[in-house]
Image (cartoon, grey):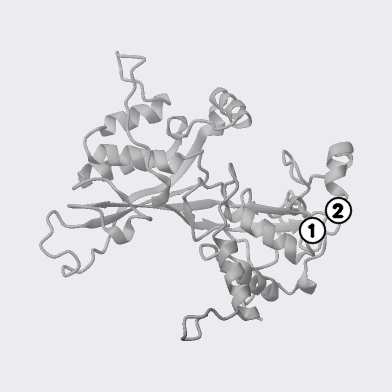
């Protein structure tokens, strides 16, 4: 600080700590590193468990989201593997009971399963655990609820899993139209131009609703494992068949006239709401992109029906030419809700 005579005074201990924290937050990410909610939770939980190796901490979310997508309804299950389990998976994998077929790691069969898992930290006080995580979090991550994994009690005795146990997921995608982009929504909304043909978009929503093979509405694979899975899926239509219970365009109340005086066409916002039992990679973004293309005249509803029925965007009689449209960018998409049917969560207070 300055003493008023132009001389710098030494910083106090608290000021030094605050300065250090500010610098730490400003450190650039390592090349190739992508920050994720999963990574933030895993690293912080590793500290709470006693500075264990973060590889032992498992964070299983109900959905895989692209970089830039938001979530306010994300359900995640977290647990910590015992120190020797990772070595056992390398050397004696056949002797490890994975409990869920197809998974690479063991999964707790019930909340107190100690076969391969450490006990919860803080003596199992979930309110304290949530409080600690929220004190450690960055500004764009928040724990909004905490509970023990519920007992399923189904006939097959399947353990709870945040993705496999879900029945429906609801996504919302925000788009905006008008003379220009509302700058206050630039990070959470896709500006698609001055206007949309709302009647055409709503008809397109009807076309996309139902049980169909949505292979034409999935993103290209991003790695060798995903590419192999993609090729396998093309040969088995059941793996790309989804049921969309609800696809709709809903107008969001406009800001007051004083906000954008004398602006024509008016600034308007809409949500594309999609509710389904499962979704393919980038599927919602493809759905929204195709609906916007219908609303701007680049596609029509016949193109949507053909893509659903044939599984591709080929132009009839002009193969291999394809119908082209812009896939919706990630920043307008929000995972709004995950429905587990009759599964009961015993939510605990976030403060202790």
Q: Which residue is mark 2?
A: 83
Q: Is residue 236 left or right of 250 when viewed as pictured?
A: right
Q: Where's residue 205, x and y in %?
A: 32, 43
Image disc number at residue 52: 1
Answer with the quarter of the image where residue 17 lies: bottom right
Q: Earlier in the sequence, mark 2 or mark 1?
A: 1
Q: Residue at x 57, y 26 (%)?
A: 236
Residue projecting furthest to the left: 262
Q: Is residue 105 left or right of 9 when viewed as pictured?
A: right
Callout 2: helix, strand or loop? loop
Callout 1: helix, strand or loop? loop
Q: CA distance from mark 2 to mark 1?
A: 9 Å
- Asked if residue 319 is positioned above or below residue 335 in the image, the reply reads above
- Asked if residue 168 is positioned above or below residue 119 in the image, the reply reads above
Q: Is residue 96 in view from this perspective?
A: no
Q: Is residue 308 in view from this perspective?
A: yes
Q: Is residue 73 left or right of 321 when viewed as pictured?
A: right
Q: Where's residue 139, x and y in %?
A: 52, 66
Viewer-proximal residue among 252 and 265: 265
Answer with the quarter of the image where residue 270 lies: bottom left
Viewer-proximal residue among 185 and 174: 185
Answer with the quarter of the image where residue 87 lies: top right
Q: How many marks?
A: 2
Local packing at callout 1 (Cα closer than 10 Å; few below 14, some 14-19, many 20+) is some
Q: Residue at x 32, y 28 (%)?
A: 324
Q: Are marks 2 and 1 in contact (CB under 8 Å)?
A: yes
Q: Where's residue 222, x and y in %?
A: 55, 33
Q: Where's residue 185, x and y in %?
A: 32, 58
Image quadrant in which the C terminus is located: bottom right
């Amino acid at each position: 600080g300055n003493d008023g005579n132009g001389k710098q005074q030494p910083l106090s201990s608290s000021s030094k700590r605050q300065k250090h924290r500010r610098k730490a937050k400003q450190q650039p990410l390592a090349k190739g590193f992508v920050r994720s909610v999963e990574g933030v939770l895993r690293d912080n939980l590793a500290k709470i468990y006693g500075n264990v190796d973060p590889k032992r901490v498992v964070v299983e979310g109900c959905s895989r989201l692209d970089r830039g997508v938001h979530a306010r309804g994300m359900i995640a299950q977290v647990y910590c593997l015992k120190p020797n389990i990772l070595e056992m998976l390398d050397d004696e994998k056949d002797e490890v009971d994975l409990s869920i077929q197809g998974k690479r790691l063991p999964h707790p069969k019930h909340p107190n399963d100690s076969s391969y898992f450490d006990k919860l930290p803080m003596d199992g006080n979930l309110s304290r655990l949530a409080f600690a995580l929220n004190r450690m979090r960055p500004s764009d991550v928040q724990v909004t609820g905490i509970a023990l994994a519920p007992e399923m009690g189904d006939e097959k005795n399947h353990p709870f899993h945040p993705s496999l146990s879900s029945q429906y997921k609801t996504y919302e995608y925000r788009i905006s139209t008008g003379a220009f982009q509302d700058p206050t929504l630039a990070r959470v909304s896709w500006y698609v131009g001055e206007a949309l043909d709302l009647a055409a978009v709503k008809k397109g929503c009807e076309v996309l609703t139902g049980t169909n093979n949505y292979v034409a509405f999935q993103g290209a694979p991003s790695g060798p494992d995903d590419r192999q899975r993609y090729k396998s899926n093309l040969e088995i239509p059941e793996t790309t068949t989804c049921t969309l219970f609800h696809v709709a365009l809903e107008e969001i109340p406009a800001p007051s006239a004083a906000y954008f005086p004398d602006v024509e066409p008016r600034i308007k916002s809409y949500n594309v709401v999609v509710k389904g039992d499962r979704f393919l990679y980038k599927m919602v973004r493809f759905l929204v992109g195709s609906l916007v293309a219908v609303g701007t005249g680049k596609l029509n509803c016949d193109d949507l029906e053909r893509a659903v029925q044939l599984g591709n965007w080929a132009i009839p009689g002009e193969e291999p030419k394809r119908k082209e449209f812009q896939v919706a960018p990630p920043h307008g998409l929000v995972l709004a809700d995950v429905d587990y049917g009759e599964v009961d969560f015993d939510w605990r207070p976030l403060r202790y």
